[in-house]
Image (tube, helix red, strand yellow):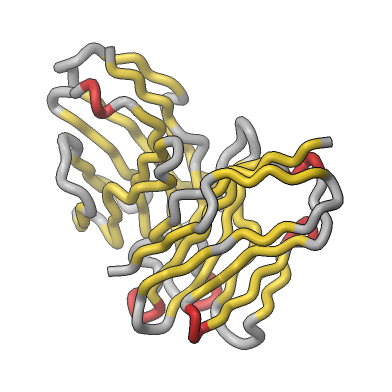
Amino acid sequence: SQTIHQWPATLVQPVGSPLSLECTVEGTSNPNLYWYRQAAGRGLQLLFYSVGIGQISSEVPQNLSASRPQDRQFILSSKKLLLSDSGFYLCAWSRWGGRDTEAFFGQGTRLTVV
Amino acid sequence: AQSVSQHNHHVILSEAASLELGCNYSYGGTVNLFWYVQYPGQHLQLLLKYFSGDPLVKGIKGFEAEFIKSKFSFNLRKPSVQWSDTAEYFCAVNAGDNYGQNFVFGPGTRLSVLP
């Protein structure tokens, strides 16, 4: 069966420090991968998605970037964190197409920038 | 680009009351539609999904949703809610001609069921 791992679960970082959140998927190949930010009352905001290694689409201009160095690894990064980057970040994966299309979510990372 | 709106930010019901959560999407082509639920302290999980065929879809825990293409709607219903249904509910759309390339979620509706 497929599983998705996201870490760390919580993170407190000072303003101006770098960020690296990692997400890996097991049990499937060539998944579509996503990073979302969840804010209270604003639902899930899609930040990035990837359909393959090295292929990243950005949905919202921001202080963050994403990379996919391996088929089942998706990394969310920042060179210098802002206070406004605080939030709950979710990684997700999906299969491609048709009735199998469904997004599966990780447990999320609560990021607090201080 | 797709977008999703949900009619209510917060719904409060008593146990055994009927539930209907509204969801509308904007996209001119074929869509796949989903309802996800997030129970307190838990990760998002799929409640039900629609791809094609019967527009009335049944999901887990007695939930169902009806796809009305002419209204661009996919409302979630349950005839009798329980306290354990307290959670946040998200409607999502996935463009049919770009399957799996992105999922767009609505802002969510928080449901509180009073015992």
Residue B46 pos. (x, y %): 60, 56
In this rendering, does residue A1 appear at all?
no
Q: Residue at x 80, y 51 (%)?
A: B81
* Residue A34 is at least partly visible in this image: yes
Q: Quadrant of residue B49?
A: bottom right
Quadrant including the C terminus of chain B: top right
Q: Which residue is drawn at the image coordinates 49% and 80% (left, top)?
A: B71
Residue at 43 percent of width and 69 percent of height: B25
Q: Position of residue B24 (x, y in %)?
A: 47, 68
Q: With respect to residue B2, does B45 lie above or below?
A: above
**Tally of numbered discs:** 0
* Horizontal side of residue A18 vs A110, given as left or right: left
Image position of B53 with respect to B88: above or below: below
The residue nearer to you, when weighing B9 against A58, is B9
Residue B113, quarter of the rendered image:
top right
Q: Position of residue B102 (x, y in %)?
A: 35, 62
